Amino acid sequence: MSSLNHISKKQSLGRIISYLKSASYYIMKSRKLLVGTSILLSLILIGVFEPLINSIRLGGLPSTAIGFYPRLLMPSLDFPLGTDHYGRDVLAMLITGIKNSLAVGFLVGFVSIAAALIVSLFAAYKGGAVDTFLNSFTNVILILPSWAIAAAAVAYIQRLDITLIALIIASFAWAGPARQIRSQVLSLKARPYIDLAKMVGERDYEIIFFEILPNILPYVIVGFSYAVIGGILAETGLRLIGLGAAEIMTLGLLIHIFMTSGLIIQGYYHFIVGPVISLILIFVSLNLINIGLDELFNPRLKKVTGE
């Protein structure tokens, strides 16, 4: 019995390793995954090295420091995106905005997927009253006007930071991935190999982590990606209407500043190009990754696309 248990674990680990190998191989073969991953990694590297880049460019000044440069400079070699009406380097603010917007998005993604896995993976496998309650609670969250509630919460909380903003958004963003993952768990737990795992003496947590989780990894990754997109969109929407911490520069706040300062009306269109293109690149890269993953793990779709 113990030998069968050991063989089952080795097979499960083998499936995970196989997924990783096939994913790395497919990234190199799929133009969608390669382009999407390359764009996203480039933006992440910009965010990671933001303190170093802005320290070199600004000489240690924060990117939001007011009045250290001439106002409303047009793009040049020294200021590729010019300066704003407060004498701030627009490129420096853009790099900071990319870092903070990605931080919000990834925090929302991680928290949402963690909550979704707890609610759906464990509850759906065990079933019973707990699963019924959590499924009903998930459905309630899905029908709530989540963005309006998040906006009200952000408006009345005085001291906001990136983590708190992400947690407010994630408190609603987990419901969608939870529902999708739950349906997959319900389907998988009825498969014969799960019955076999129980027969050889595997514990519930071993079945969950070694038998079920490897088979739902594609849904987890796609759910995480959409949660990141939703988190960035929600935070950008909040900033566009003037909500959130004014001292935390994000892409949404950058767009809000230029829309409300009258610079666009005065013809300084280049100010808005940076944050808009950055948001487009984030969304395009994540959607390309989702499409590539769908083609990787969906054999029927691979036949249709011919890849």
Image: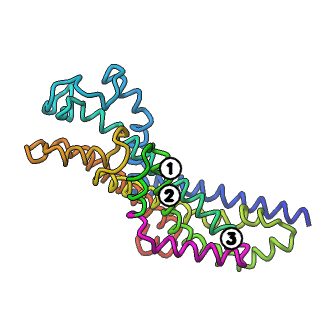
Asked if residue 58 lies left or right of residue 33, the reply is left
Magenta stretch contains residue 175: no
Residue flagged by tag 2: what amino acid is it? Answer: Ala
Residue flagged by tag 3: what amino acid is it? Answer: Ala
Q: Name the residue under label 3.
A: 123
Give the foreground label among 1 and 2.
2
Which residue is found at the position 25% from the left and 43% from the top?
A: 274
Relative to the observer, which residue lies in front, 125 or 3?
125
- Secondary structure of the residue carrying tag 3 is helix
- Secondary structure of the residue carrying tag 1 is helix
Count of numbered marks: 3
Residue 126 rendering spot, x and y as whole percentages? 73, 73
The reply to whether callout 2 and callout 3 are in contact (CB within 8 Å) is no
Cα separation, mark 2 vs mark 3, equals: 20 Å
Q: Mark 2 points at which residue?
A: 170
Which residue is found at the position 77% from the left and 63% from the top?
A: 205
If you read the primary sequence from the N terminus, does the residue marked by circle 1 or circle 3 appear first?
1
Res 107 label: 1
Query: Which residues, given as a range, are shown in magenta?
Result: 123-148
Q: Is residue 60 above or below residue 303?
A: above
